Structures are given as structure tokens and as C-alpha cells.
Amino acid sequence: MAGITHGAGVAWLLLVLLVFPATAEEQYVLWGDARKGHRIFGEKGCGGCHAIRAARPSVGPDLGRVGAKQLTMTQIAGVMWNHAPAMKQAAMEKGIVWKPFRGSEMRDLIAFLYAINLIDEPGNPRRGERLFVERGCATCHSVEGEGGTIGPSLEQWKRYGSPILWAELMCSHALGMEDKVREFGLRWPRFDDNDMVDLIAYIQRELGARR
């Protein structure tokens, strides 16, 4: 067991060196590629023990619910360091071949784990449909031909599946919408907690947007 712990310690020290700056003068993080990290998650057998938001039964913690929204990259590295000995032991007990990480693989994996914790939980389209009417969106905008005509139809947003693009669209739209709200004497809609997530889920459902 001592050999396992020592080997894991060396491996995770390399992890820190890969993910973080090599010199004190460098103030940036060497970010990995989350898309490659997703592939590595499967290739290394991580899914044999860990679920992503309860997508399947898991032995280890659900990596989609580890609270990375509150963790820095350094703290994530610390959590993984602490977990390394138990993780390798569990892999051996399940007969999972321990595959060493090479090159930027660990950096890419951490980028993937960090990214999935920044993505919202799936929204409730039925609640979003109600919000679309209650918050006044339907007064100005139409979805699949139903709704108002003061503002543009949301049909043009069909091609946007990324939450990052939706955030950009909503922020840009808010700037131009303010004048119309004043012009027509409407009340500025307010969205709290998961309201926006549910609203977007409804729009995507109606438009058949790609996920």
C-alpha cells in the first residue's frame, strides 16, 4: 500500500506541475481542452466509478455535483491529490487497469471536470413556458409563430445550443430591449434562481435546438 501511495503522490505532483504555471513569474493557468478531457474521462475508465450528474451508478462521488463552482483550480488539484490513494485502490479492487496520464491529459481532464460544474442543471421547459407568458416575453416575442411581434421572433435563436452563446445573446438583447420596454410602457422582467434556465429550456424545446 505504501508503494501505491508513493506512486500516486508522484503522479499527482506531476498533475500540479502540468496544470499550473512552471515559474513564479507566470501568472496564468495552462488551461486544458475540455473536449479532449471528455474523451479521456472515458478512455481512462473514470466512468466505471464516477457518474456525471447521476448519469449512471457510481462507486465514487458524482463528479457533476462536487461543487466545483465554489472551488478554484488549485483547490480541485488538492481534492484530487487527497483522493488519489483511495481511487487507485478502488480501481484495483474493481479490476480496472490503471492507465497513467501523459502529456496534457490530466490538464484536459481537469478542464472537463471544471467545465461540467459550470453548466446549469437541465431546465424545466413546462415551467419555462409559464414564465414566458408571466414575465411578458410573449408580449413581444413569438416562438413557432405564437406570441407578439414587437420584438424579433426567437426562431433565429434555434441554432444556438451553447449556454455561453445564450448568455451572450441575452445580455446583448437586454441593451436594445430597454428602449422598447419604455416605449410601450411595459415592466422590465426579472429572473431569479433557475428562471432563465427554465425559460431557455422551453425555447429550445419549442425550436428543437441542438443540445
Image (spheres, rainbow, N blue to C red):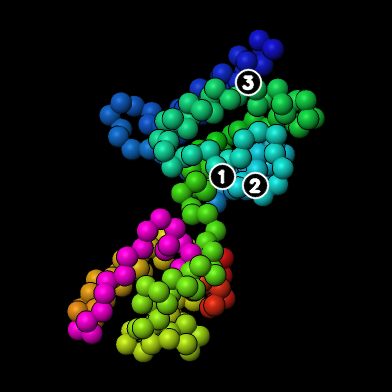
Q: Which residue is depicted at the point 34% across and 27% down?
A: 23
Q: Nearer the viewer, mark 2 or mark 3?
A: 2
Membership of 189 in magenta stretch: yes
Residue type at mark 1: give it.
Gly
Report the Cα–Cα distance between label 2 and label 3.
Answer: 24 Å
Closer to the camera, 19 or 165? 165
Q: Which residue is depicted at the point 38% across and 28% down?
A: 22
Residue 191 image position (x, y, % from top left): 36, 63
Where disc 1 sits, the SS reads loop
Residue 127 image position (x, y, % from top left): 51, 67
Report the Cα–Cα distance between label 3 and label 1.
Answer: 21 Å
Give the residue number, with chain letter if any, for mark 2: 54
Membership of 151 in magenta stretch: no
Q: Residues within 10 Å of mark 3 (few under 14, many from 20)?
A: some
State the extent of the magenta-drawn residues as a range.
Answer: 183-199
- Earlier in the chain: of badge 3 and badge 1, it is 1
Residue type at mark 2: give it.
Ala
Give the residue number, with chain letter if any, for mark 1: 64
Residue 50 in sight here: yes
Q: Which mark is residue 85?
A: 3
State if disc 2 and disc 1 touch (CB < 8 Å). Answer: yes
